[in-house]
C-alpha cells in the first residue's frame, strides 16, 4: 500500500521520460507486436483508472466494466448514429461515467456498503448496465455497434490506416494524461484526503475531511478515466458489444493490472499491464505454435487461460501486494 | 454565553441509556474533567458532541451556534478537535502527513498546511518521528499523534478521550504540561481520564458521569467529597474485587 | 452507527430455517401480479395467457429449489470461512461433467451418481481449500475474491480442454414414463412439467434437509456451527478450526455438486454452464443473508420465481434484470438479508 506521495515533479519527469522512450516504439515495432503494445497501453490505462478507486481510495471495484462500457458505448453510439467525433464522444463518456460513478458510489456509501457487499454491488451495477444495454434496440442490442471505416484517415474522427503509428501515439498520449492526473491528484490535498479516508474514515472525519464526498470523488474520477480508455478501445478495434463492454470478464481485466502490479501504488498498474498482456500473448502463442515437447497442446483452446489463471493464483499467494508493490516495499526497508 | 452548551442530551443503544439527559457547559479556556466508571457513557458523550452518532434528544450549542445534527467533519472544522480512545492513525501515512490532513482540511494551500503540521509536531515532541509511518509508532507516540492531529485543526475546544492512559508516569508529565499550555492559549479542554491524580490536578471543574447520568459537577474538592460519587466509585471497586 | 452490520466479520453462520410470514406475502403478491398479467397483456384472456403464466410459475418454483441448494453451499462456505467463493459455479460445472462421464461413458443412471459425484467433489473442494484457499485466509477480501475467480477460470478452461466446447447432455430414458395413473411430463392446465425438473426440486429439498440435519444434529455439524459463530471461541473449546474449514469447503462444494447432478438431465452442459448459477447464487446468498443457510433456500425459490415472472412482465428484457434490481435493493435496504436480524 502506498503512502501519500512525495515529489510530484520527480514522478512527472519519470513519466515524461517513459513517454518519450515509448513514443519511438511505432517506428521500430510493426504489425502484431505493435498491437500488443497498444493492448498494454489500454490495459495500463484502465488499470490506472481503477487504481484511483480500488487502490488509493481503497474501494474495491469488481464492476469497473460499467465505466469502460459507458465510455465505449457513448462514443460508439454518437459516432455510428450521429457521425459525431469520438473526441466529443470520449468527453461525453467520461462525464457520463463520472456521473454514474458518483450516483452509484454515493448510494453505496450512503447505505454503508463495505467489503464483500460493496464489491458485489459494483459487480451488480455493471451487470445491470450490460443487461439494460442488451435490451436496447437503438444500441443494437446484443449485436453491438460497429465503427464505420472511413475512406481516409482523420485525427478528428480518430481513425487512421492500420499501419499508422498514430493509434499507438494517441493511446500513449491518453495513458500519459491519465497517469499525470493520478500523480497530481495524489500529490495534492484532495488525494491526501482520499488516502486518509481509506486509512481511517472516522479519523479522517475527525480531522475535518468529508469522507463521503472524497470517496465519491475518487469513484467519479476513476470512472471517467476508465471511460476514456473505453472510447479508445472502440476506435482501435472498431467494435463493441454489451458483453465485451460491460461483462464480468472486462471488470476483471480492468482490475488485474493493478492487483498484479500492486494496488494503490503509482506505477503498479502500468507494471502489471506490461506483465499481463505479454504473458497472455505468449501463452496463446504457445498454443498456436507450440515447441516440439509441447506439441500435444497445439490448437487446443483452454491451455492459455489455464496457464494464465495458474500464474495469477501464484502471484496472489506469493506476492499478495503485487509485483511492483512487493518490490517497492523491499526497497524502502 | 459558554463556549459549549449541552442540554438534555440523551442516547440509547437498543434500550440501554448510554447518555441520559445530560446538561453541562464548558467555558472558553477552561479545563474540564469528565470522569466516571467504565461504561458510564463518556465516549458516547464525546461521540454525540462531535457528531459521530446522532442524538436521540437534546441540543449541542457551540460558540453560539446550534451544531446538533452536523456531520463530524463540519464540527471538526467549526472548531472541535477530538482524540479517540481507540486510536485511529492513518497507518500507512507518515506522521507528518497524518497531521497535515487535519491542517489542510481548513486550509486551501497544502504548503501552509505542511508548515502548520510541522509546528504542531514540534509542540507535541514528535518532530523527530515526522517521517515514520504512523502505524509503526509506539503507544505513547500515537497518543501524541492523536493530540497533534486534533490540534492541527486549531480548535477552540478539544475533546480528549483518555490521552494519558497507557502511558508511564514519565511519559505523562510533559503531556500534562502541554495540556496546560494549550489551555493557556484560550482553548477549552474536555478531558476524559482514568488517571485520577492527573485529572484532579489539571481540571478546574469535574463532571461525573454514572450510568449515563450526570451524577455530580463541581470543583475537584467538591466532587471528591460528594457521597454519591464515592458510592459510585466504591460500587465499582467492590465489583472489581469480586471478579 | 460506525459499525454497520455489513462490516462485522464474526458470527455469520445461521443454520435454522426460519421463514417470516411476509415472505409468503411476497410470493402471493408475485402470483397476483402474474394473474393480473394474464388479464392485461397481449395474451390476455386467451387460455394461452393462463398457460404461459402457470408455466412460468411452476418452472420458476422448481428451478428455484435448485438455485436454493447451490446457494446453500455458497452460504455455508461464507458463514464459516468468510470468503466469497467465486469458483462455486465452476465446481458445479465440474460436478456435472463428472456425472456426464459416469452416465454417458460408464452407463450409470444419472441419479445414482448422487452417491458418487458429491463425494468426489467433496474431496476436490477439501483439497482446493487446503492447497489454495487456506494460505490466503488472512489476505484482504479482494485477493480472496480474485483467487477464487482465477480458480474458476482454471477449472472452466481445464474442462474446455478436456471436453471441448461442444454442448453435452444426459437424457433419461424414462422421462416420459408413467407411474400408475400419473403420466410424465405432467400437464397441469396446459403447463408442461417435466419429470427431471420435479426430481430436481424434490431432490434439492431432500439434500437441503439432509444438510440441515447434519449441521444441526451431528457432532461435526456442531463443530462447524461453532466455527461459524466464533472462530476463536471454537478453537478454545477444542475445535480444530483449520480442519473444519477444509471440511466446510468440501461440504459446500459437495452440495453444489448434488445440485449439478440434479439439473444435468434437463440442461445442456458446457464449460461455462456454471457461470449463471454462480451469479445467481451470489444474489441469493445476499438475499437470504450471507451465512444464513435457510435464507439461501428460501431466497433461491424467490429468485427462481422472480426470474420467470419478471421475464413475462418485461418481455424483451433479460430475465436477470429484475433479479439484479432486487439484489441492489437488498444490498441497500437490508444488507443483513431478507431474513436477517437473527445474526445480532
Ligand atoms: N455503538 C454502540 N452500540 C451499542 N452500545 C454501545 C455503543 N457505544 C457504546 N455502547 C454502550 O454504551 C455504554 C457506554 O459506553 P461508553 O460511552 O463507551 O462508556 P465509557 O467511555 O464511559 O467507558 C456501554 O454500556 C457501551 O457498551
Ligand atoms: Mg470510553
Image (cartoon, coloured by chain):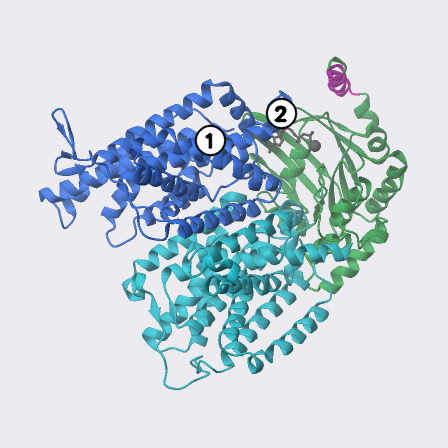
Chain colours: A cyan, B green, C blue
Residue at 61% across, 47% down: A317
Query: Which quadrant is the N terminus of chain C positioned in?
Result: top right
Question: Is residue A206 placed above or below C174 in the rendered structure?
Answer: below
Name the residue carrying label 1.
C251
Q: Is residue B239 magenta?
A: yes
Q: How many marks?
A: 2
Q: Are marks 2 and 1 in contact (CB under 8 Å)?
A: no
Mark 2 chain: C
Q: Are both tags, 2 and 1, on one chain?
A: yes
The stretch of residues the image draws in magenta is B226-240
Q: Earlier in the sequence, mark 2 or mark 1?
A: 2
Residue A88: x %, y % from top left: 44, 75
Query: Where in the figure is residue C101, as x and y percent of width and height?
Result: 35, 40
Q: Is A297 inside the magenta-drawn segment? A: no
The numbered mark at residue C142 is none
Looking at the picture, does residue B209 appear above or below residue A268?
A: above
Q: Residue furthest left?
A: C46
Residue under numbered circle 2: C235
Mark 1 chain: C
Q: Residues within 10 Å of mark 2 (few under 14, many from 20)?
A: some
Amino acid at each position: 500500500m502506498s503512502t501519500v506521495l512525495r515529489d510530484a515533479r520527480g514522478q512527472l519527469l519519470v513519466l515524461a521520460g517513459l513517454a518519450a522512450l515509448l513514443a519511438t516504439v511505432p517506428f521500430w515495432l510493426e504489425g502484431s507486436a505493435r498491437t500488443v503494445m497498444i493492448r498494454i497501453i489500454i490495459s495500463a490505462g484502465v488499470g490506472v483508472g481503477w487504481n484511483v478507486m480500488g487502490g488509493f481510495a481503497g474501494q474495491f471495484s469488481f464492476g469497473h466494466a460499467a465505466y469502460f462500457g459507458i465510455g465505449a458505448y457513448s462514443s460508439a453510439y454518437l459516432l455510428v448514429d450521429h457521425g459525431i467525433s469520438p473526441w466529443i464522444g470520449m468527453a461525453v463518456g467520461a462525464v457520463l461515467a463520472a456521473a454514474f460513478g458518483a450516483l452509484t458510489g454515493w448510494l453505496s456509501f450512503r447505505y454503508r456498503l463495505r467489503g464483500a457487499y460493496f464489491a458485489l454491488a459494483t459487480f451488480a451495477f455493471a451487470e445491470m448496465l450490460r443487461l439494460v444495454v442488451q435490451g436496447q434496440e437503438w444500441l443494437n442490442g446484443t449485436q453491438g455497434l460497429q465503427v464505420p471505416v472511413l475512406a481516409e484517415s482523420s485525427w478528428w474522427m480518430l481513425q487512421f490506416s492500420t499501419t499508422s503509428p498514430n493509434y499507438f501515439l494517441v493511446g500513449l498520449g491518453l495513458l500519459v494524461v491519465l497517469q499525470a492526473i493520478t500523480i497530481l491528484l495524489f500529490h495534492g490535498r484532495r488525494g491526501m484526503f482520499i488516502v486518509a479516508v481509506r486509512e481511517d474514515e472516522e479519523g479522517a472525519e475527525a480531522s475535518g475531511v468529508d469522507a463521503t464526498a472524497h470517496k465519491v470523488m475518487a469513484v467519479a474520477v476513476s470512472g471517467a478515466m476508465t471511460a476514456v480508455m473505453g472510447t479508445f478501445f472502440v476506435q482501435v478495434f472498431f467494435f463493441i458489444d454489451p458483453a465485451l463492454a460491460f461483462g464480468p470478464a472486462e471488470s476483471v481485466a480492468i482490475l488485474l493490472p493493478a492487483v498484479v502490479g500492486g494496488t494503490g501504488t503509482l506505477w503498479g498498474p502500468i507494471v502489471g499491464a506490461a506483465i499481463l498482456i505479454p504473458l497472455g500473448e505468449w501463452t496463446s502463442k504457445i498454443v498456436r505454435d507450440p515447441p516440439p515437447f509441447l506439441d500435444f497442446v497445439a490448437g487446443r483452446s483452454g491451455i492459455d487461460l489455464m496457464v494464465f489463471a495458474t500464474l495469477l493464483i501464484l502471484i496472489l499467494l506469493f506476492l499478495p501486494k503485487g509485483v511492483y508493490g512487493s518490490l517497492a516495499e523491499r526497497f524502502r526497508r | 454565553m459558554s463556549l459549549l452548551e449541552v442540554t438534555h442530551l440523551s442516547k440509547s443503544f437498543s434500550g440501554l441509556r448510554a447518555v441520559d439527559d445530560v446538561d453541562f457547559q464548558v467555558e472558553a479556556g477552561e479545563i474540564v474533567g469528565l470522569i466516571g466508571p467504565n461504561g458510564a457513557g463518556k465516549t458516547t458523550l464525546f461521540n454525540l458532541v462531535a457528531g459521530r452518532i446522532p442524538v436521540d434528544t437534546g441540543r449541542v450549542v457551540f460558540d453560539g451556534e446550534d451544531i446538533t445534527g452536523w456531520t463530524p467533519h463540519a464540527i471538526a472544522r467549526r472548531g472541535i478537535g477530538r482524540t479517540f480512545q481507540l486510536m485511529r492513525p492513518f497507518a500507512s501515512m507518515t506522521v507528518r502527513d497524518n497531521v497535515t490532513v487535519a491542517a489542510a482540511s481548513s486550509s486551501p494551500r497544502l504548503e501552509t498546511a505542511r508548515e502548520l503540521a510541522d509546528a504542531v509536531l514540534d509542540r507535541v515532541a514528535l518532530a523527530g518521528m515526522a517521517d515514520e509511518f504512523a502505524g509503526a509508532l509506539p503507544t505513547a507516540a500515537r497518543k501524541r499523534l492523536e493530540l497533534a492531529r486534533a490540534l492541527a485543526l486549531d480548535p477552540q475546544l478539544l475533546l480528549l478521550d483518555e490521552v494519558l492512559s497507557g502511558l508511564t508516569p514519565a511519559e505523562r508529565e510533559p503531556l500534562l504540561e502541554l495540556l496546560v499550555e494549550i489551555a493557556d492559549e484560550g482553548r477549552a479542554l474536555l478531558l476524559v481520564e482514568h488517571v485520577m491524580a492527573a485529572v484532579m490536578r489539571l481540571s478546574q471543574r469535574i463532571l461525573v458521569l454514572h450510568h449515563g447520568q450526570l451524577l455530580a459537577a463541581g470543583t475537584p474538592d467538591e466532587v471528591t467529597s460528594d457521597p454519591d460519587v464515592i458510592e459510585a466509585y466504591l460500587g465499582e471497586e467492590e465489583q472489581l474485587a469480586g471478579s | 452507527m460506525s459499525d454497520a452490520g455489513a462490516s462485522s466479520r464474526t458470527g455469520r453462520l445461521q443454520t435454522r430455517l426460519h421463514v417470516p410470514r411476509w415472505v409468503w406475502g411476497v410470493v402471493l403478491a408475485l402470483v397476483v401480479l402474474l394473474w393480473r398479467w394474464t388479464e392485461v397483456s397481449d395474451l390476455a384472456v386467451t387460455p394461452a395467457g393462463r398457460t404461459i403464466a402457470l408455466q412460468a410459475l411452476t418452472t420458476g418454483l422448481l428451478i428455484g429449489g435448485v438455485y436454493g441448494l447451490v446457494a446453500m453451499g455458497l452460504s455455508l462456505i461464507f458463514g464459516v470461512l468468510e470468503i466469497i467463493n467465486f469458483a462455486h459455479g465452476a465446481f458445479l460445472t465440474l460436478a456435472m461433467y463428472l456425472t456426464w462421464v459416469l452416465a454417458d461413458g460408464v452407463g450409470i443412471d444419472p441419479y445414482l451418481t448422487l452417491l458418487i459425484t458429491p463425494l468426489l467433489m467433496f474431496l476436490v473442494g477439501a483439497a482446493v481449500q487446503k492447497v489454495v484457499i487456506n494460505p490466503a485466509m488472512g489476505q484482504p477480501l479482494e485477493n480472496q475474491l480474485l483467487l477464487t475467480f482465477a480458480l474458476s477460470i482454471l477449472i472452466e478452461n481445464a474442462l474446455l480442454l478436456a471436453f471441448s466446447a461442444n454442448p453435452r447432455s444426459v437424457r433419461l430414458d424414462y422421462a416420459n414414463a408413467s407411474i400408475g395413473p400419473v403420466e410424465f411430463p405432467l400437464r397441469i392446465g396446459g403447463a408442461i412439467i417435466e419429470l427431471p425438473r420435479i426430481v430436481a426440486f424434490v431432490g434439492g429439498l431432500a439434500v437441503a434437509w439432509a444438510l440441515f440435519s447434519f449441521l444441526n444434529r451431528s457432532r461435526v455439524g456442531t463443530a462447524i456451527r461453532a466455527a461459524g459463530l466464533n472462530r476463536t471461541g471454537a478453537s478454545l473449546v477444542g475445535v480444530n478450526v483449520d480442519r473444519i474449514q477444509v471440511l466446510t469447503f468440501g461440504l459446500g462444494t459437495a452440495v453444489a455438486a448434488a445440485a449439478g447432478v440434479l439439473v444435468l438431465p434437463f440442461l445442456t452442459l458446457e464449460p461455462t454452464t456454471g457461470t449463471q448459477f454462480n451469479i445467481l447464487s451470489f444474489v441469493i446468498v445476499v438475499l437470504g443473508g450471507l451465512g444464513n443457510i435457510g435464507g439461501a433456500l428460501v431466497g433461491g425459490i424467490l429468485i427462481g420465481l422472480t426470474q420467470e415472472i419478471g421475464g413475462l412482465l418485461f418481455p424483451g428484457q433479460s430475465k436477470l434484470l429484475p433479479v439484479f434490481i432486487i439484489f441492489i435493493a437488498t444490498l441497500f435496504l437490508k444488507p443483513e438479508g431478507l431474513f436477517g436480524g437473527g445474526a445480532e
